[in-house]
Amino acid sequence: MVQVISGRKGKGKTKILLDRVNQSVKTAHGTIVYLDKSTKHMFELSNRVRLIDVSQYPLKSYEAFLGFLCGIISQDHDLQEMYLDSFLTIAHCDNKTIEQAVNDLEAVGKQYDVTFILSVSEDNDNLPENVQKVTTDAL
């Protein structure tokens, strides 16, 4: 399953994502991973959440990013949720490629029983229709 939190930069998407991950960790039976473009929010996350700073890896395309996610999933059979902050940046996507990215994540999520929660710096109205169906506006 894929869930998207959308809104322009500065609308509070990261705060919502951090609140959700910290709430989820209280009832989670599996592992939770948080991917971000830096370690800036390290101290805002529960110590039970694995933070991965994507900028530390040589990912230069969406295909490389998808392979990176699959590598994380392959190493953790208890993985339950993945939170992806600044999704368009870390996944090397834009408004034209996000539709395929969401479709790919839906397929991977179903196959491995992982939920993906993404923050996207874009208004919901500017996103493709299939992405809008799984989107919650930040505010």
Image: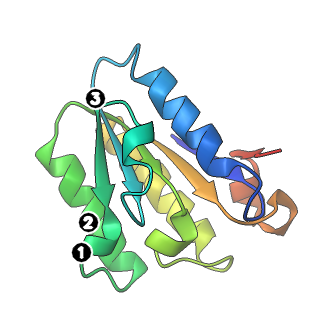
Secondary structure found at label 3: loop
* Mark 3 / mark 1, whichever is N-terminal: 3
- For disc 3, the neighbor class at 10 Å (few under 14, some 14 to 19, many from 20) is few
Identify residue for label 1.
57
Find out whether the residues at labels 3 and 2 contact each other: C-beta distance under 8 Å.
Answer: no
- For disc 2, the neighbor class at 10 Å (few under 14, some 14 to 19, many from 20) is some
Identify residue for label 2.
68
Find out whether the residues at labels 1 and 2 contact each other: C-beta distance under 8 Å.
Answer: yes
Between residues 136 and 14, which one lies in front from this camera angle?
A: 14
**Residue 18: x, y in percent?**
53, 39
Identify residue for label 3.
48
Q: Is residue 97 left or right of residue 58?
A: right
Whether 134 is drawn above or below 57: the answer is above
Whether 126 is drawn above or below 131: the answer is below
Secondary structure found at label 2: helix
Whether 98 is drawn above or below 50: the answer is below
Q: Which amino acid, mark 2? A: Phe
**Residue 105: x, y in percent?**
45, 55
Name the image quarter holding residue 78. top left
Q: Which amino acid, mark 1? A: Tyr
In space, the residues marked 1 and 2 are separated at their CA atoms by 9 Å
Q: Is residue 112 left or right of residue 35?
A: left
Between residues 45 and 135, which one lies in front from this camera angle?
A: 45
* Mark 3 / mark 2, whichever is N-terminal: 3
